[in-house]
Image (tube, helix red, strand yellow):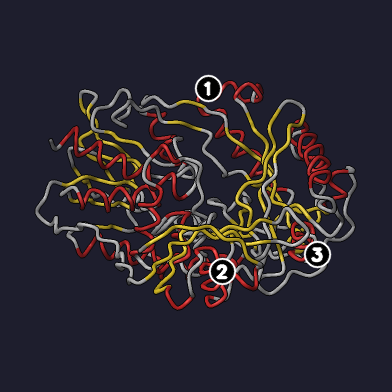
Amino acid sequence: MQQKIQITASPEDASNSEIIKRLAAQKLNVAASEISDIRIERKSIDARSREPKINLTLNVFCGEKPVLLKEEFKYQNVTNKPEVVIVGSGPAGLFASLRLIELGLKPVILERGKNVSERKKDIAAMIRAKTVNAESNYCYGEGGAGTFSDGKLYTRSNKRGNVFGILQRFHFHGAQDEILYESHPHIGTDKLPEIVKNMSRTIVECGGKIYFDSKVDDIIISNKKALGVKCSNGNIYEAKAIALATGHSARDIYELLDRKNIKIEAKNFAVGVRVEHPQSLIDSIQYHCKTRGEFLPAASYALTAQAYGRGVYSFCMCPGGYIVPASTSAAEIVVNGMSSSQRHTAFANSGIVVETRIEDLKDFEKYENMCGLKFQQQIEQSSFANGGGGQVAPAQRLTDFVNSKYSSSLPDCSYIVGLATSALHEWLPDALARRLQEAFRIFDKKMRGFLTAEALIAGVESRSSSPVRIPRNDDMQHVDIEGLYVCGEGAGYAGGITSSAMDGEKCAEKIKNAVFK
């Protein structure tokens, strides 16, 4: 007999399988010896009361053993099947490729950056030298920006596709069991590179192709039909379907489309800063305690506010994490955050970004559909100009920023490249600075102690979403170019790993249905 139940336990009890078994037996009014197995289906933390609790949804088996559910995906050999060119190997590109294999088509991935192993070396060199390799960094290379993110898989985009199916594919390729039942699943930047390599291995072993150091610099079009792409190394790849899955940082793709008069659109996006607190402070606020217990994870938060007519919100919150350089150009500074699977650093960081609408960019109207991208570039260049040289980021104590004061010193920080004291309230666009200042005051009312001199902000967090959309029809083809499919964050239709992966899978299905019926 199998029954689904819900129980609530203390963090310590929830970590003990024998206690969980005893609580389940009490709930079902059976002897613990009658329970043959328990599977966790859902796990979440309720920290609203003074004593945090763990909510568990369990599948309890009495008198029978559960059937082990092993993910089975029909990754067939597609060596001699029709080819589909995928530009980019981020979540959208990888999941599109895996789905194409299931559908009997051969993916040919063109990735501008390097494989994971070589990419790690370039990132380490970048941190040591405080400079940027424009083609191999935290954004470009095998797995895209997702490889060296922390792998937060929570999404509200359930209507886009099968969220659990995405989690299962990650699990199949090496992710930990917990992602299948945690309410906010998270893989960790320490585990993602190997998982990405496993996905690439599946694609190649099934007959697909992945070409690294293959930057696409032209799309071959005739009579409004995409016939192939040309790479900067001179190689040309032809196919009946081309899928752009280039991510939101591949500005040269937007510029290419603009030069070729292929329609693109400016869209609303978000820009802000990254804030960092001591993790112990966030723990004390969220868990209502002086010291977090050993059975509780590093606390997180999600904050929103309305400030002078625009939404301001936390983005990519990284408990027990660290700030990293996410620039793709040596003359720009962009910061991002990530955390390992253990989330064990002494710091908690999050992007705090402000809704930026097209009508807010009057000074960039001459750039038309590229106005948001040009604004994004300018603020990243300002961040570089106000930093400490190289990728040393400009920073300010949070209280000083809110009070428009210069910081004479900075607290300890996780950003290994280094920080330089800077008056962000002076050089950030006035509307952006004022909204951030007001939002931080509001956040302090929601989380007492959030606004503190122990926290700092670093600039700038500008790649949370794309400032450009590539318009597509219901078949996910460009509205004017037959055979040119667009998906993921770079197309402006997704945000985050899971929604991008679902968009990639959907794109593969559309290609199969439209081109290879």
Q: Which residue corresponds to the image point at 13% horizontal and 46% vertical from the top-left? A: 82
* Whether residue 47 is situated above or below residue 176 in the rendered picture: above
- Across and down, in percent, residue 108 comes to 23, 51
- Across and down, in percent, residue 432 comes to 73, 35
Left or right of 197 in this view: 403: right
* Marking on residue 23: 2
Q: Quadrant of residue 207?
A: bottom left
- The mark nearer the N terminus, 2 or 3, is 2
For the residue marked with disc 3, what is the amino acid? Cys
- Dot 2 lies on which element? helix
* Marking on residue 289: 3
Residue sitting nearer the eye, 25 or 446 = 25
Point out the frontmost of discs 3 and 1.
Answer: 3
- Dot 3 lies on which element? loop
Alpha-carbon span between mark 3 and mark 1: 52 Å
- The mark nearer the N terminus, 3 or 1, is 3
- Dot 1 lies on which element? helix
For the residue marked with disc 1, what is the amino acid? Glu
- Across and down, in percent, residue 357 comes to 62, 26
Pointer 2 with pointer 1, Cβ within 8 A: no
Point out the frontmost of discs 2 and 1.
Answer: 2
Q: Which residue corresponds to the image point at 53% horizontal and 34% vertical from the top-left? A: 467
Residue that mark 1 sits on: 368
Residue sitting nearer the eye, 244 or 378 = 244
